[in-house]
Amino acid sequence: MRLVIQRSKQAKVTVEGEVTGSIEKGFVILVGVTHEDTEKDAAFLAEKAANLRVFEDEAGKMNHSLLDVGGEVLSVSQFTLYGDCRKGRRPNFMDAAKPDHAETIYEAFNRFLAEKGLKVETGVFGAMMDVQLTNDGPVTLIIDSK
């Protein structure tokens, strides 16, 4: 399982002209799932994301987590995180999980975040989405479960 986490001041996702998710201060998390990922991977990454210390404390050091600052999450499924671009000019998406498995793991990830008390907004699984955000910092991290 792979996450791209962007610290944001605000963000929203729109599907067919309708806002499906919107947050203030927090994380935009792009979520990719591969074939062998399980709910254990989802739980591990939810724990990691919720507790990453990337928000500034009073001294300006990245010392606070999403939980510490009362941040929110905009979670967006993104199979293209498993695009292999090493050969040719067209990405190979063979490592991306099939939609039914990917959606199950994606929903588990969101559930684990919500169980930690975080507000979790989402896009629409499998839809074409427009994602707008104000990246804060910018701070962008890539985290894999394996």
Image: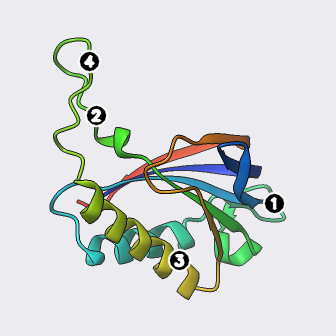
Q: How many marks?
A: 4
Query: What residue is disc 2 on?
Result: 83
Q: CA distance from mark 4 to mark 1?
A: 46 Å
| Residue neighbourhood size for the residue with mark 1, other residues' Cα within 10 Å, grouped as few (<14), some (14–19), many (≥20) | few
Q: Quadrant of the N terminus?
A: bottom left
- Toward the top, the furthest residue is 89
Q: Earlier in the sequence, mark 1 or mark 3?
A: 1
Query: What residue is disc 3 on?
Result: 113
| Residue neighbourhood size for the residue with mark 3, other residues' Cα within 10 Å, grouped as few (<14), some (14–19), many (≥20) | many
Tell whether 60 sits left or right of 139. right
Q: CA distance from mark 2 to mark 4?
A: 9 Å
Q: Amino acid at mark 3?
A: Leu
Position of residue 105 measured from the top left corner of the image (x, y, whole percent): 33, 69
| Residue neighbourhood size for the residue with mark 2, other residues' Cα within 10 Å, grouped as few (<14), some (14–19), many (≥20) | some
Which of the two discs, 1 and 3, sits closer to the camera? 3
Which of the two discs, 4 and 1, sits closer to the camera? 4
Query: What residue is disc 4 on?
Result: 90
Question: Residue 59 — which label?
Answer: 1
- Residue at point 72%, 69% (across, down): 71
Q: Amino acid at mark 1?
A: Ala
| Residue neighbourhood size for the residue with mark 4, other residues' Cα within 10 Å, grouped as few (<14), some (14–19), many (≥20) | few
Q: Earlier in the sequence, mark 3 or mark 4?
A: 4
In the rendered image, the vertical position of residue 40 relative to residue 132, given as above or below:
below
Of 102 and 68, the residue lying toward us: 102
